[in-house]
Image (tube, coloured by chain):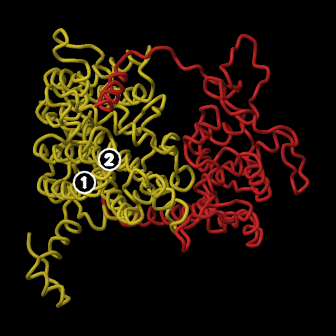
Chain colours: A red, B yellow
């Protein structure tokens, strides 16, 4: 019954004159991503750096449940590297012959284990906020990669004058309503890049965003590659069909 | 019409017992078609092809999809990531729905412009309206299946519309849900019905074609075929023209599939459904936006609250489609084509603009100026069918019609080019 009431209230709310427009956040800066445009592709080195940022920073709170470690082969890690990267995570397996569940190092075939056992545990550890799974985050936000990058570089501390933050909240330029529960996750030198790239805040934000774009849409490159041949083929075919149509119709007086 | 003789003995043997080849010869090859159809006549066959693409991709997707609240979202992502070319099938299906509506809406506007709904094609038109209704039901239920936030909340809002029905509304909603909220039972039945409905559409399309081939195609001049000099056989002339149109359409359709597959979608639907979190703006898919605007346009009760605004909104929304079924009798003008109806032609374009305005109002939150826009556009939508069209039948003086199709479109015909015959 409660649910019916809630649902009815929701439907009724749609008819009620809306009160108070939501506070609009500015549009995040457009980044010149390597994957922009029709022919854009991912930068493998950037994705690998982004994975490092995820594993060392984001994974503390955010899951990446739709990615299996074997998928990392696609961004240029070797089979041995993938096995090694996977083994740094522990996953639950079992039951064993004695009926007990047990923990073991992850294998390439495993998906990235979630940092928390369930939503309640995640909220309990994060002051009531729930860090969302990041598997689809770039496709699930208006503004996509630019927005995610904007959030990561958009913290202002102290907040602008006249803004009072709620307990445990942080000011972010691009977050709707500007109050975000996530503490600034990145700062200059937060990770040590193995490829020698300088780990500025902006560099790390770009790398992790590129990586998450790939996780959201791992078939992007294949899709565009096939798409170009398909469209070229169709243009030629359609041109020929047009010529054929002209030819067939040439004896019709119309 | 005489039955063709078949050279191939096997085909002949079958055809004498089951005349499928004669039917095909009759309806796909010999079918006499007006020689003056323009490219707006391509969209009927395109719609049929899109239907086949939707069924083909849908059947394969259903092999990998799991209609369970705990697995639906993940199973769609598994299709996107782990199934071979699953992303292609899924994007074809997803964008195919949008293309289906684009094609069908153009097909309908063509019918409105050239008066294709008028006698003797009233039933042909009405079957078409039923196809539209079936498409809407199919598309709505299909959108629920990925079990994202918009899937869930869209389903909640739309099923709740039935609670506006007096006395029994609440019971109907519970019955539709198969429970007390949109939940697993709802998802299961939507999947079942989403698989069923395309075949209902297929049957309706068959009836649509039977009716079409009985009264024959209308044409841009809107005048009847006077004899064989006015027509050409469907094959090869219109088969090849439709093939060319299909090529152009596929470039557009696959352009979206390969280069902007989420253009028509809502980012929120990549967030798994969560009954505890309502998205800030619940919007339906773009093809429902004009109807959504009509639904929300009614913000006032009638008869001192006896008929609440919500019920009126639901009536208006369904009424906006039902009114189409009465169009053949609302329009009393004997002239079909807008080419010879100078005033109707203007109002047709105003109506097209009105539909876009409704879509624009539907896409935005019902606040401030959008409320007024939605209300004015809704009022105009109904006025178009209930006031303007009936009135025009009496007021308008149509231009003289050409003697025949061939007289109008051939140089030697009656010695009069189409334009001067019309003016």
Chain assignment, label 2: B
Q: Mark 1 points at which residue?
A: B197
Q: Considering only vertical position in the picture, is B158 above or below B20?
A: above
Quick check: B126 left or right of B236? left
Label 2, residues with CA under 10 Å away: few <14, some 14-19, many ≥20: many
Residue at disc 2, secondary structure = helix
Q: Residue furthest bottom?
A: B9
Percent position (x, y) of residue B259? Answer: 57, 53
| Residue B346 or residue B194, whichever sits in front | B194
Quarter that holds the N terminus of chain B = bottom left
The answer to whether A183 appears left or right of A12 in the picture is right
Q: Circles 1 and 2: CB distance less than 8 Å?
A: yes
Q: x, y (%) of residue B254?
A: 49, 57
In whole angstroms, how far apart are the C-alphas of marks 1 and 2? 10 Å
**Mark number for residue B141?**
2
Q: How crowded is mark 1: few (under 14 residues within 10 Å), some or many (20 or more)?
A: some
């Amino acid at each position: 019954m409660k649910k019916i009431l809630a649902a009815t209230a929701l439907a009724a709310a749609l008819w009620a004159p809306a009160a108070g427009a939501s506070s609009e956040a500015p549009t995040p800066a457009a980044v010149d991503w390597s994957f922009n445009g029709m022919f854009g592709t991912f930068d493998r080195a950037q994705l690998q750096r982004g994975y490092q940022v995820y594993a060392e920073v984001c994974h503390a709170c955010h899951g990446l449940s739709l990615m299996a470690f074997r998928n990392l082969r696609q961004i240029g890690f070797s089979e041995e590297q993938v096995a090694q990267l996977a083994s740094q995570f522990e996953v639950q397996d079992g039951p064993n012959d004695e009926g007990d569940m047990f923990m073991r190092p992850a294998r390439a075939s495993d998906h990235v284990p979630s940092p928390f056992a369930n939503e309640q545990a995640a909220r309990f550890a994060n002051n009531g906020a729930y860090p969302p799974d990041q598997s689809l985050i770039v496709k699930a936000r208006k503004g996509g990669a630019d927005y995610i990058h904007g959030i990561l570089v958009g913290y202002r501390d102290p907040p602008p004058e006249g803004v009072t933050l709620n307990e445990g909240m942080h000011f972010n330029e691009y977050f709707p309503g500007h109050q975000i529960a996530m503490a600034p996750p990145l700062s200059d030198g937060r990770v040590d890049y193995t490829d020698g790239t300088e780990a500025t805040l902006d560099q790390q934000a770009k790398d992790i965003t590129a990586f998450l774009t790939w996780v959201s849409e791992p078939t992007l490159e294949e899709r565009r590659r096939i798409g170009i041949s398909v469209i070229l083929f169709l243009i030629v075919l359609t041109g020929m069909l047009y010529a054929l149509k002209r030819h067939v119709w040439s004896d019709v007086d119309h | 019409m005489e039955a063709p003789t078949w050279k191939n003995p096997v085909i002949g043997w079958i055809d004498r017992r089951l005349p499928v080849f004669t039917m095909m010869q009759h309806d796909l090859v010999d079918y006499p078609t007006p020689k003056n159809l323009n490219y707006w006549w391509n969209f009927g066959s395109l719609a049929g092809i899109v239907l086949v693409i939707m069924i083909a991709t849908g059947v394969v997707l259903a092999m990998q999809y799991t209609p369970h609240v705990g697995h639906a979202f993940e199973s769609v992502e598994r299709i996107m990531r782990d199934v071979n070319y699953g992303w292609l099938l899924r994007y074809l299906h997803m964008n195919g729905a949008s293309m289906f509506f684009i094609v069908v809406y153009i097909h309908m506007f063509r019918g409105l412009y050239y008066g294709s709904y008028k006698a003797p094609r009233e039933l042909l038109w009405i079957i078409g309206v039923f196809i539209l209704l079936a498409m809407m039901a199919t598309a709505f239920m299909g959108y629920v299946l990925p079990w994202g936030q918009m899937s869930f909340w869209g389903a909640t809002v739309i099923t709740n519309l039935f609670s506006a029905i007096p006395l029994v509304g609440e019971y109907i909603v519970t019955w539709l849900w198969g429970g007390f909220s949109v939940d697993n039972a709802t998802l299961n039945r939507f999947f079942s019905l989403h698989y069923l409905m395309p075949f209902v559409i297929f049957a309706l399309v068959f009836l649509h074609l039977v009716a079409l081939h009985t009264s024959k195609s209308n044409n841009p001049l809107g005048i009847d075929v006077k004899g064989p000099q006015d027509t050409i056989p469907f094959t090869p002339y219109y088969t090849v023209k439709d093939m060319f149109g299909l090529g152009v359409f596929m470039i557009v359709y696959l352009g979206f599939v390969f280069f902007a597959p989420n253009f028509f979608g809502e980012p929120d639907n990549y967030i798994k459904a969560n009954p505890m979190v309502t998205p800030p703006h619940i919007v339906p898919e773009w093809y429902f936006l004009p109807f959504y605007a009509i639904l929300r346009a009614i913000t006032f009760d009638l008869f001192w609250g006896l008929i609440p605004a919500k019920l009126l909104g639901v009536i208006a929304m369904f009424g906006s489609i039902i009114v189409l079924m009465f169009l053949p009798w609302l329009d009393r003008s004997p002239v079909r084509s807008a080419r010879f109806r100078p005033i109707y032609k203007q109002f047709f374009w105003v109506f097209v603009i009105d539909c876009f305005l409704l879509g624009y109002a539907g896409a935005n939150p019902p606040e401030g100026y959008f409320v007024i826009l939605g209300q004015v556009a809704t009022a105009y939508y109904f006025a178009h069918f209930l006031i303007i069209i009936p009135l025009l039948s009496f007021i308008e003086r149509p231009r003289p019609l050409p003697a025949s199709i061939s007289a109008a479109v051939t140089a030697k015909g009656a010695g009069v080019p189409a334009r001067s015959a019309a003016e």
